[in-house]
Each structure stands twice: as C-alpha cells, then as structure tokens.
Amino acid sequence: VPHGGYLGWVHIVNVVTLPDNSRWVIDASFGGDGPTQPMPLVEGAEWRNMGTQDARLIKDFLPGQTEFTSGRRLWIYQCRNSPDQSWISFYAFSHSVEWLPADFEISNCFTGTSPHSFQTTTVLVVKFLLRESKRSPTGEEIYGKRMLVNDV
C-alpha cells in the first residue's frame, strides 16, 4: 500500500458515459488495491472491492493545491481494508480534462524511466483470488489477492 504525498499524474483511468448519461470509471491496471469493478462516478459512493476491502471516490483538494474553488477539486480513489480503518488515498484524476496522445506519452515516459517512479524500482505481481458467488451477476467474486512485491 503506497503512503506519502501526491505524486502527480502517474495513473490513467477511463471515464465512460453511458446512454443514460451515467458516468463510470474503468481502471484495469492499478494493482493490488485497484478497483475490481467499474466505479460509479458519484461522489461518496462506496462499494465492496474484495474480501473486507471497501473503495470509494471522493472529490477533494490535494495537499499543496493553492486554489480552493469547487471547480478545482479532483476525484480521489480511496480504499480501506475494514470499517475500523482510515481511508487511504491512492490516486487522483479529473473527469473534465481530456488526455491526448502526447499526455499519455509524457506520463508513460516518467513512469517508465524516472528513478523516482515506483514502476522503475519495484517488481509487482498481483493474482486476484476468485470463488463462486450467488450474489455476483457473473457467478464469481474476488475475495482476496496474493501479491509479490520485489522479493516479498
């Protein structure tokens, strides 16, 4: 679980608008604490991510921001492993900024080459654990994970 301050635009999500105008966040590549299903782009909505872990999206300001108008709040993805634990912020994004190919190239250059990037210094493998579930529309649910971080 990462800790520390905001690292910048180091993660990319897709925001999808459906015909009913509902918006959903699709994120298939964050890792062990990433979302395991599409997330409704609704402030404060919470859902069971896996096992006992809950996730949510909130809108808030980031540490270090200097302008505090409502239009400057960002979406922040958060998780907690049980109701008695604090929420942990993992990444932030804006649904009102459209990324262009050059934006993806710059972000990928940093994450793939900078010595300050988690991705250049860490081996991370995640296997999500599935089991049958009558509650899930697919008949399966993710109930946990196994992670390899470097040699641990």
Image (cartoon, rainbow, N blue to C red):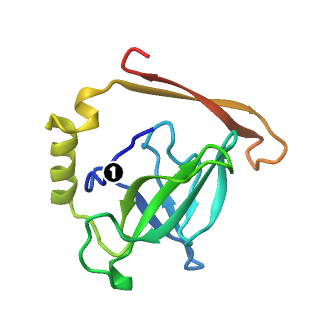
Vertically, is 59 above or below 82?
below
Please state if 8 lies on the left or on the right of 150 as rendered. Answer: left
Please state if 150 lies on the left or on the right of 144 as rendered. Answer: left
Q: Position of residue 78 (x, y in %)?
A: 51, 55
Residue 134 occupies quadrant: top right
**Residue in front for this viewpoint, 52 or 124:** 52
What residue is at 39 percent from the left and 43 percent from the top? 3
Q: Quadrant of the N terminus?
A: top left
Vertically, is 145 above or below 65?
above
Q: Position of residue 17 (x, y in %)?
A: 49, 72
What residue is at 28 percent from the left and 34 percent from the top? 119
SS at mark 1 in the image: loop
Q: Position of residue 150 (x, y in %)?
A: 36, 19
Which residue matches tag 1?
A: 11
**Residue in front for this viewpoint, 115 or 136:** 115
How many numbered tags mark residues here? Answer: 1
Residue 100 occupies quadrant: bottom left
Q: Badge 1 local density, few (<14 within 10 Å), some, or many (20+)?
A: some
Vertically, is 98 above or below 117?
below
Looking at numbered disc 1 in the image, what kind of residue is underneath it? His
Q: Residue lying farthest top? A: 151
Please state if 46 lies on the left or on the right of 149 as rendered. Answer: right
**Residue in front for this viewpoint, 122 or 40:** 122
Vertically, is 84 above or below 115?
below
**Residue in front for this viewpoint, 47 or 64:** 64
Q: Position of residue 16 (x, y in %)?
A: 47, 66
What residue is at 38 percent from the left and 60 percent from the top? 92
What residue is at 44 percent from the left and 16 percent from the top? 152
